[in-house]
Amino acid sequence: MNANNGELILYRTEDGRTDIHLRASDGSAWLTQAEMADLFDSTKQNISLHIRHIFAEGEVDEEAVVKYYLTTASDGKRYKTKAYRLELILAVGFRVRSPRGSQFRHWAATGLAEYLVKGYLVNDERLKDAERVDYFNDLLERIRDIRSSEKRFYQALRELFRTSSSDYDGTTQTAKNFFATIQNKLVYAVTGRTAAQLIVERADPEVAHMGLTNWSGSRIRKADAVVSKNYLQDQELSQLNRLVTMFLDFAEDRAMRRIETRMADWIVQTDRFLDFNDREVLTGPGRISREQMEAIVSERYAVFEDQRRVSETLMDEEQAIDDLEQLRVEAKRVTSTSSKETR
């Protein structure tokens, strides 16, 4: 994922006039009040009124369906935004009593349910449509991105080498160094740097998101900051995804043909593969070890975390001021309404 608040799921209303991006997180989908107003073709004030009544009547538990996201405004500042879980969205949809409410409920029970269970949603008819090439290409790119993640990549290599390497032992330090060597060669082929060197050069606590372009979850964790793929720009990421996919296909083909290959031979085969694809081949371990990189990143992450804590404290204070202002406006509106009713 990019600097985001969860995976985005596109929902297009049946009249085609509105596109809504729901956030997929914690096994559900989330929308803000403004997004619900667009979805149900209503006003934010009306949505807010329905939500207050739903909570007051105990239809849903407020603590279970409310979540805050950090969003980046046009001025570059990050603000807390309140979002509501699918159960609340559906409850509001029942109350607004509009065609869009019933349409969304039907979609949520079919397509959205499939996405939340499987983690992806495939539109078979769109894939068969030759005119929808971009959709298919986007799906392929996402599959490549998943396949090249460190966890999936190592898992695939372990299975392949267990089959085709006569001296493979996944429990040894030699095997761990072996995986790191292949990863370094692939990263170097795309960026001209080893994984450790790339991280040290790009991890910067003074820039937005510490220089990361991608991370898991809603917050950057220390574990995210030591993954080289998380620092790649879009073009580099696309190249790495394609290269990893080709390499795994190459290795899988050798394994399926039962070509016995010792671990040392796989290093040679990796160099041959990269050379054939006109990629620069890394020789040697690189100038920075993983241990050195982790020590450097640990110090930089500590600085980043301190700055983030200060920033979040300021945002909390600004949110409190905004909440008080909203309460003041609401109190004024209620007082005005009561005065009119007593006349």
Image (spheres, helix red, strand yellow):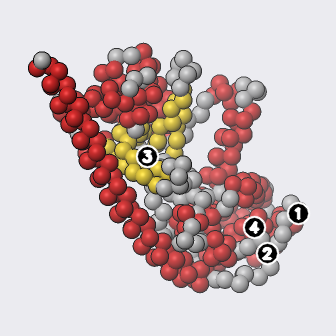
Residue beneath disc 4: 191
Marked residue nearer the N-terminal end (3 or 2): 3
Residue beneath disc 3: 25
Against 99, is 155 above or below? below
Q: Secondary structure at mark 2?
A: loop
**Side (left or right) of 273 relative to 137:** right
Q: CA distance from mark 1 to mark 4?
A: 14 Å
Q: CA distance from mark 4 to mark 2?
A: 11 Å
Residue beneath disc 1: 278
> What residue is shown at x 35% (from left), y 39% (from top)?
84
Confirm or deny contact between disc 1 and disc 4 (CB under 8 A).
no
Tag 1: residue type? Asp
Against 306, is 104 above or below? above
Q: Mark 1 vs mark 4: give the one in front.
A: 4
Q: Position of residue 161 (x, y in %)?
A: 68, 65
Q: Position of residue 249 (x, y in %)?
A: 75, 54
Q: Secondary structure at mark 3?
A: strand
Marked residue nearer the N-terminal end (3 or 1): 3
